[in-house]
Amino acid sequence: MNTNTSTLKYTKKKSLRKQFIKYRHIFWFIIPALAVTLFWGYTPMIGTLIAFRTKFDLTSFYTPLGSFFDPTANWTLMQFRAIFYDVDFIVALKNTLTISFLKLFICFPLSIITAILLSELNNQKLAKFILIVICLPNFLSWPVVNGIWENLLSIQGGLVNNFLVNNGFLDEPFWFYGSREWFKPLAVFLSAWKGTGWGSIMFYASIMSVDKSYYEAASIEGASKVQKIRYLTLPAIMPMIALMLVMNITYILDAGFEQIFTMMNPETRYSQQIIGTYLYDISIVNQSNIPFAVALGVFNGAIATTFMLSGNALCKKTLGKGLW
C-alpha cells in the first residue's frame, strides 16, 4: 500500500514537472502579473495592522514602518470596541443600512421588471433600442448626474420646481437637495434612474436565452401573459436573480460613496453621513484617528465577506450554483 502511494506521488510530481517544462514560456507572462497583484493588492493589506495600535502618527517618524514601533503606542483591540460606542458611526450605520435596503427593495426589483417588460414587446429591435437608451445614464459619473438633477430641482428656475409651483402642487419652490427628509428618497431615485437600465441587461439576456417553444406551447394551452411570466420567465431567470441578489447583499454596507458624497451640502453634511463618507472624513479630511478609521474599514470588509460567503453558500444549497 505504501509502495503504491509513493509511486503515485512520484508520478504526479513527474507529471507536474513535465507540464512546467512544457508551458515554461507562459510563466513569463504570469510572473509580472502575479508580482503586480501581490505588490498592489496584498502589500497594502499590511496597513490593516494599524487598526490594532492605540495611535499611529506618521508625522513623528520618517517612515511608516517606524510608526509601527512607536514606543508610546500599544497593540490593542480598543479601536474595534470603540466602533460601537461612537455616536457618529451609529448615525452613519443607520443611514447606510436605510439607503442600502431601500435600493435593494426598490432598484433591484425594478431592473427585473424592466427586463421582463422589454422581453414582452413584440418588436425586439425596439426593445433593444429602449434598453440602450435607458443604459446611457449609467455611463455618466455621479458628479454629472447630481449636477443635472440639482439644476432640474433648483429653487431658482428649476424645471421640476417650476412645474410643481405652476400646477399648484407647491406654494413655493422646495429645495430637495437640502431637505433631510427627502435626502434618502432622492438618493434611491437617482440610483434607480442611473442604474436600472444597466442592471436589467443580465436579466434581459437570460430571458432571451429561454427557448421560445415553451412560450408557444403555453399560448396554445391558453396561458395569459401574466401566467407565462409567473410560470416560465421567472423560474428561468431565478438562478440569475439569486446570484445578483447575493452580489447586492455583499455590498449592503456600501450605500454608494461617490453618489452620497456629491449629493451632500452644508445642510445635510453631518445628518446624512454614511459609513463611506464618515470614513473619508476621519481618515483623509481630518486625519483625527487613523487607527480607528482602519479598524472601521476592516470591520466593513469583514461584514461584506461574511455576507458574500453566507449568500454564496445559500445559493449553492438552494440552486446548486454559486459565485465560484
Image: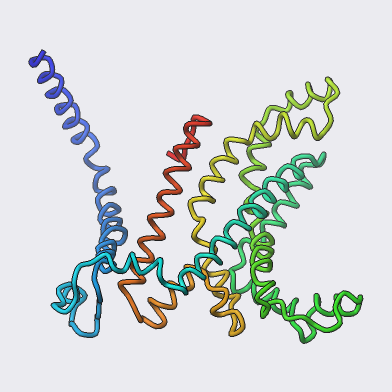
* Residue sitting farthest toward the right: 167
Q: Position of residue 39 (x, y in %)?
A: 26, 60
* Residue sitting farthest toward the bottom: 156
Q: Quadrant of residue 216?
A: top right
Q: Is residue 68 above or below residue 301?
A: below
> What sort of colour scheme is used for the picture?
rainbow
* Residue sitting farthest toward the left: 3
Q: Quadrant of residue 103?
A: bottom right
Q: Nearer the viewer, residue 213 or 237?
A: 237
Tell me the residue at 75%/52% (across/down).
130
Quick one: quadrant of the C terminus? top left
* Residue sitting farthest toward the top: 1
Query: How many numbered circles are shown?
Result: 0
Could you tell whether 75 is left or right of 299 in the image? Answer: left
Tell me the residue at 28%/48% (across/down).
30
Could you tell whether 176 is left or right of 4 in the image? Answer: right
Tell me the residue at 54%/64% (across/down).
96
Q: Is residue 303 above or below residue 179?
A: above
Quick one: quadrant of the N terminus? top left
Q: Position of residue 162 (x, y in %)?
A: 84, 80
Q: Position of residue 9 (x, y in %)?
A: 14, 24
Tell me the residue at 14%/27% (across/down).
14
Could you tell whether 263 is left or right of 313 in the image? Answer: right
Q: Nearer the viewer, residue 79 or 29?
A: 79
Q: Is residue 106 above or below residue 84?
A: above
Q: Position of residue 191 (x, y in %)?
A: 64, 62
Q: Quadrant of residue 124?
A: top right
